[in-house]
Structures are given as C-alpha cells and as structure tokens.
Image: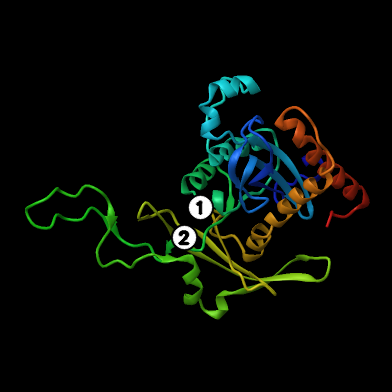
Amino acid sequence: MTELIGDPVNGSIHVDESGFVKKGTESVGVKRQYCGRLGKVENCQVGVFLGYANGAYRTLIDEALYLPKSWAEDWERREKCGVPEDVVFKTKAELALEIIPHARDNGVPFGWIGMDSFFGEQPWLRNEIESKGMIYIADIPVNTRVWLNKPETGIPERKGDRGRIPTKEKVLEGEPDPIEVRKVKDQLDAEQWNHVFIRDTERKKLWSNIVCIRVYPVVDGLPRDEIWLIIRIDDGDESLKYQFSNAPPDTGVERFAQMSCSRYWIERAFEDGKRDSRSCRLPGTWLDRMAPPYGAISACNASSIDAGHGSR
C-alpha cells in the first residue's frame, strides 16, 4: 500500500496501541487490562500498531501482539496456545521500537514518526528513535517539565566535613526550577503564536494556533539536549495539545503544523478498520483476526487514489 501513497517527505508513520475485547482466558495475551477503545480496564487482547499516513490517505502497515508478563511466564498456557519458545515479555514501548525500524528497513518512505503520550512520555524511547537518525513528534502529558533556559549543572561541594562526598551531577543551587509545559503558555508573548491552516474538513476549514519554542526537557532531574516544544490549540477547541520533537532547529511552523496534526489520520485508520470488520469473526491467530481491518483500509485507499482524492 505504501507503494501507492508513500512519500519520503510528507509521509509519516505512527505508533499506537489498541485493544480488542475478548471473552474467556484462552486467547493469546488476553487478560483484564486497559483497553484504549473503551477507555477502561476490560478483558481484552492488546496490540501495538504501526500506521502510515500521507495527507488524507492512511493505512495500517504492521502490528505486534502485547504478551503480558503473566502470559510470558505461564509455560503451560503458552504451549497450549502455540506461543513460540523464543517469545519473551516486552513492554509496549519495546515492541514499538522493534516495528519502527522494521518499517524503515523494508523501504517504507516517511519524514517523521508520530506517537501519543503513552509512548511520547518515555525519554528512552525518544532517544532511541533519535539515535537511529529518525525524526519524531510525540504527544506528552501536560505535567511534563522543561527548562526554557538551560540551568547550570555540576557536582555540588560537600557541606561541612561530615557525610559522603557528592559524586552525582545535579542542577546547582540558585538555578531556576523547571516548569510544567501547561504553564509555559502563560509566559509566551502574543506574537509568538501563529495561526496556521491545517486541512479541509467535511464542514469547514480547520485552523490552529501554534507556538514552537526550544526547551530543555527534564530527565532524571537534569536538563537534556534542547528540543522543540509544540503547543497547539485548534480553532473552536479550548483544549491544548503539547508535543516534543527532535526536528532540526530551522524547521518552520508550517511543517510543525503538518506533523502535529497527522495523528488524526491514523485514528481514522483504526475507525476504518473497526467499522469494516465488525461483521468478520475469524478463527485462528491474532494475525488472522487483523486481516479484515488491513484489507478494508487498503481497499478504501486504493479506490480513493483511483478517484483522485483522499478518503475523508
């Protein structure tokens, strides 16, 4: 499918998790766990998915079943359900880090990686993605802390003659405290905001107010490398979205607007697949059950491309 809609500049891949409600205890990985589709804990299977978007075109391109630790350590149940012996417990973020490079290694063209706050709030995952030479834009929680100016750090001197000699780097006394990203907007000037066109919707044009500033995220109490903080407010929506990005320092606000809003299409891809597979009930493996959503989305995109427009 990416051969039809792929673009190394405007295409993007997005990692997300999704749950599928199940009855009983025999389906691989099923247990009472958080189900994003329902927004609550339910008996379900959970998968980590990779989607692809280019404008309004979107599709799911890869997935990995999340195997909870209780399942990974239950060898009797694993053998009964045919779970391979080499499968070990991995967190959802670790699964994401496997399927992201897999897409690139298989020639999927993309300009950036998008992720929601579940993945975006994990600094080690962002660092691993950056270390592989890939650009990300990651949703983050509102209480994520940053410094607007890099504080001075060092190993503090020992106070007095007693106690251990300090050996751990810290932010030195007298330096400002970091602030939560939700409080950053109160320190911004009006001219720092940009009113940017996002896309056409079914009823109107969508515009957003966006500000992009350089900050130093807090990781283990210390300032890390300078990155972008993007704050976005869509017209007609009072809620604010906060994101980190390791895009180059000269990246323009229009590019950030494109990147910031691209996750919308992956959410639509999930809706496409769930809607078109509701009547499908396949026996067999997790991959068997995922076949209808993949096929439905791909067919939808192919017909839209033939018609010369994106699927809305």
Q: Quadrant of the C terminus?
A: bottom right
Question: Residue at (68%, 50%) from the top-left corner?
Answer: 37
Dot 2, crowdedness within 10 Å: few (<14), some or many (≥20)? some
- Indicate the position of residue 154 as horizontal and vertical percent values: 26, 54
Q: Which of 96 and 285 lies nearest the eye of the viewer?
A: 285
Residue that sits furthest to the bottom in the current view: 190
**What x and y, as percent, mark residue 151?**
34, 62
Which quadrant, please, contains the N terminus? top right
In the figure, residue 71 lies in which quadrant? Answer: top right
Q: Position of residue 57 (x, y in %)?
A: 79, 51
Q: Tell me how far mark 2 sits from mark 1, CA to CA.
A: 8 Å
Q: Of the residues shown, which amino acid type is indicated by label 1? A: Glu
Left or right, 288 with reference to 250:
right
Count of labels in the image: 2
Q: Nearer the viewer, residue 211 or 119?
A: 119
Which residue is situated farthest in the right direction here? Answer: 307
Percent position (x, y) of residue 108? Answer: 70, 39
Residue at the limit of the structure toward the left, as seen here = 161
Label disc, if present, on residue 222 of the rendered structure: none
- Look at the image and tell me whether residue 1 can be seen: no
Left or right of 187? Residue 108 is right
Q: Nearer the viewer, residue 67 or 118?
A: 67
Q: Which residue is mark 1?
A: 121
Q: Secondary structure at mark 1?
A: loop
Give the amino acid type for the residue marked by disc 2 in the picture: Thr
Res 254 → quadrant: bottom right
Tell me whether circle 2 and circle 1 mark residues in contact (CB < 8 Å).
Answer: yes
Q: Residue at x 55, y 51 (%)?
A: 118
- Answer few, some or many: residues within 10 Å of disc 1's Cα (few below 14, many 20 plus, some between 14 and 19): some
**Residue wearing tag 2:** 144
